[in-house]
Image (tube, rainbow, N blue to C red):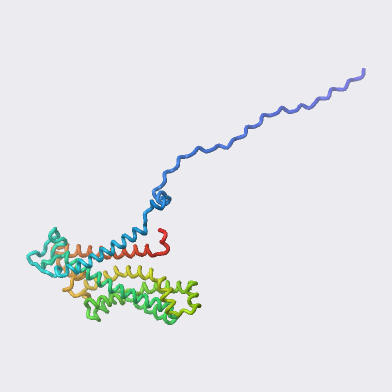
Amino acid sequence: MPELPAPVSQPTAPAPQAAAPVSQPTVPAPQAAAPASPSGAVLHSPLRRRLPNRRLALVLFVVMLSLLAAVVCAGIALAPTATATDFSQKNLSPGLGHLFGTDWMGRDMFARTTAGLATSVLVGLLAAGASACIALVLGMVAALGGKKADGVVLWLVDLVMGIPHILLILLISFALGKGFWGVAVGVALTHWTSLARVVRAEVIQCRQAPYVALARRLGRGPLDVAARHMLPAVLPQFLVGLILLFPHAILHEAAITFLGFGLPPELPAIGSILSEAVTYLSSGMWWLALLPGVALLAAVLLFDRAGACLRSLIDPYRAQE
């Protein structure tokens, strides 16, 4: 019998595998919002809720100037009382009758301190104003007068800054016979250097401005350009420098008077009060030096804060605060 062919084995198809489950992206659980920091709350608060910094600076500036004006007026009004003696009331400690106590001659120390502050403020105003004017003139001459004028002004600046202020004020005051005018002239001739450099730098920067070049092309003269265009640009820095000169002038006037080369002893001044009080400190009369010194420090700080407030008001980089 013929052999039958062997049956051909059919290939078996592989069993279908189960599809792998598709992983779904996990959504993170919402986290609780972190509490806003106090600084963030201020930065992101509406404008009407922010602190009006410029208005506050203006109010502080006016208040400080008012306090200084009140001190001057009170000192002028109390000048006769500051020199009146009453030996039955001598060496009294501070109390309700005499806020700052009395000295060895029965003079009221509050009246003497107020009159001395008024004298110091007047000397500081006169000296700082004259020194600021010198700085303004020499700074503009250095910036607009050419290389020779610039070299001469910078040489004067280096010369004055190379001598200690106290020593130079001593020499000038002694040469002028000491007294009110000797101190005022000495302080005025020694405190203009830093402000002159600031004015010179501001004028040099302003000289490169397009509106200054346009004014020159239109035929404006150097004096007209300086008065109409450069002086208004320098004025903010000039005013700030003028205010900041007052503390230095007051402190140097008190130092020169303390050393005996300033105001006369019969004129109420903080330097004279402190110089006379040194002899009596060992006797326990602490109020003769402590309270006038604190009053002088308060007046200096008032001028310093007034200058800082004025700077924040007129500085163009802080105009949006």
Where residue 249 appears, x then y in whole percent? 28, 71
Above or below 69: residue 15? above
Above or below 128: residue 286? above
Instruction: Give the left or right position of residue 130, taking residue 107 as reference.
Output: right
Q: Residue 206 sits in which quadrant?
A: bottom left
Q: Residue 266 sits in which quadrant?
A: bottom left
* Rendered residue at 18%/68% (across/down): 77
Number of callouts in the render?
A: 0
| Quadrant where the C terminus is found in the figure | bottom left
Above or below 189: residue 78? above
Instruction: Give the left or right position of residue 15, taking residue 8 as reference.
Output: left
Where residue 227 appears, x then y in whole percent? 41, 76
* Rendered residue at 25%/66% (across/down): 69
Instruction: Identify the residue at the far right of this view.
Output: 1
Instruction: Identify the residue at the far front of this view.
Output: 218
* Rendered residue at 34%/62% (across/down): 309
Instruction: Identify the residue at the far left of this view.
Output: 88
Q: Is residue 164 visible?
A: no
Q: Residue 84 sits in which quadrant?
A: bottom left
**Depth order, front residue of 17/80:** 80
* Rendered residue at 47%/39% (across/down): 31
Where residue 268 appears, x then y in whole percent? 18, 71
| Quadrant where the N terminus is found in the figure | top right
Where residue 141 appears, x then y in whole percent? 40, 79
Q: Is residue 27 visible?
A: yes
